[in-house]
Image (spheres, rainbow, N blue to C red):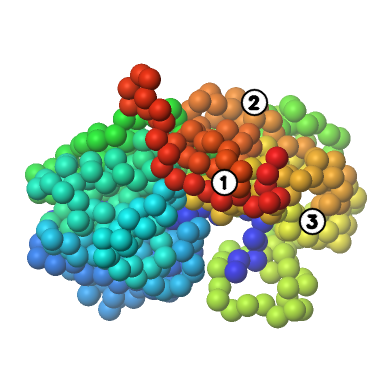
Amino acid sequence: MPVDSEGPRDACGVFGVFAPGEDVARITFYGLYALQHRGQESAGIATGDGHRIHLRTGMGLIAQVFDEADLSYLPGQVAAGHTRYSTTGSNRVENAQPVYVEGPRGPLALGHNGNLVNSEVLRRDLEQQGYMFKTSTDTEIVAQLLATAPGTTWERRIGHVMQRIWGAYCIVGVTPHGLFAMRDPFGIRPLCLGSLNHGWVVASETCALDHLGATFVREVEPGEALYIDENGVSSYKPVERQRGGLCIFEYIYFARPDSVLRGKLLYPVRMAMGAELAREHPVDADLVIGVPDSAIAAATGYARESGIPYAEGLVKNRYVGRTFIQPDQRLRDVGVYLKFNPLREVLAGKRLVVVDDSIVRGTTTPRVVEMLRKAGAREVHMRITAPPIRHPCFFGIDMATKWELIAGSKTVEEIRQHIDADTLGYLSIEGLLRAVGQTRDDFCTACFTGEYPMAVQLQMDKLVFERPPVSPGEKPEPVGVAWIWEEDRH
């Protein structure tokens, strides 16, 4: 488990390349390296050489899974890669992606970022048809659906699958001959298209393109599918685009600050969040510091707007990531010191504004405050760039029950007391939207508001997700359920 278990955790990063004559496995390795922040539990690469698919997967970070021998085993002209954090399916090697399946029209392998809300229904239907599953992920469900979909063209087969699956998904995969990608009609997870020499690249974020010298072309649109082969890029739109549903946490936390989303570089957007925080929650203080790394830009914005000097007060050990070596009790007790070290001479006697991106479970923030006080801070004023997270996410973020969310049961004042801060200020939803320069209808903000982009009915102990009606007068079609813990009911 990671030392910093406080923040929300996204499901995955996906990457794909079609580039005849290039070392596509190596390109994918470095593309995934740039997306390592999106998942650190497992990684995999699949390549197609025109005849068959080659696959390597393993547990751990990209650099731990692959070496030169692995890359030499992955020949071909097309590749898809995946780095995973598990939100559905347990953390085990069988669930590492891409997932490989064989169908009547040959093999394919794919990786998935997101979470399907109708996976149970689809899995049960496939099992009744005699399909045997090797993993517990919804990714294998999509792979089986695609491998057995009717139609002789990729347009029809992909369209058939996209009309059946419902939820959040960005899917990237390979056949022996080409690369395919799909994005859900709400656009909950990001996906972009780039060009590389005489080939093409798709990736979760633009930073992966930058590292490879690829040129950003455009974002893959919500409800769009791509198939890329020697004939170029074919675009299909088999499902109707819905209202905007991009997860707003991509702006707050998930995506790297050097990535571009909807035409906006994230670093200045996060600076704007900090400036909004300074206007909404001013305080007399001596220094502004940010919790590395995701809150540094916001802390800089807070300092500029407030006129309070910015300082680096916490040094991050950048080599402490996910590990399968569990700390002993003594190391658990020191906790956050494994990841951060305070600069005592900078902090001693100072009144601090401490900027962080979120408080999810309320487990790590009290340790950060305690560490700063032990380093000599006279006051600690916490400022958070996300509004209070009060509702569970069903679309690929690891916060699926309300009872584990501290803001789901406590007021802001109670949270302040819990973390032992002198003051606590959350950025409002209105301030967050001003910072990103877009409207609430452009995003999924359900974790703050409880208003999900997909139609939801509360029925006793479950949420029923509904596909919107196709024609006037038609009733919404139930497509999936999410079970609610007793503590989650209002």
Q: Is residue 398 visible?
A: yes
Residue bearing the label numbered 1: 462
- What crowding class fits label 1: few (fewer than 14 Cα within 10 Å), some (14-19), or many (20 or more)? some
Identify the residue at image location x=39%, y=46%: 169
In the orientation shown, which residue stands out farthest toward the top? 472
Residue 111 percent coordinates (x, y) = 34, 57
Give, as a three-letter code, the residue at label 2: Glu
Q: CA distance from mark 2 to mark 3?
A: 27 Å
Q: Secondary structure at mark 2?
A: helix
Query: Residue 366's mark?
Result: 3
Residue 208 percent coordinates (x, y) = 37, 51
Work out whether residue 303 or residue 373 is closer to the camera in this orientation and state it.
373
Q: CA distance from mark 1 to mark 3?
A: 33 Å
1 or 2: tag closer to the N-terminus: 2
Q: Tell me the mark number nearer the camera, choosing from 1 and 2.
A: 1
Residue 429 lies in what quarter of the image? top right
Identify the residue at image location x=49%, y=47%: 481
Left or right of 33? Residue 410 is right
2 or 3: tag closer to the N-terminus: 3
1 or 3: tag closer to the N-terminus: 3
Identify the residue at image location x=25%, y=34%: 237
Residue 15 percent coordinates (x, y) = 33, 54
Residue bearing the label numbered 2: 430
Q: Secondary structure at mark 3?
A: helix
Query: Residue 105's mark?
Result: none
Give, as a three-letter code, the residue at label 1: Lys
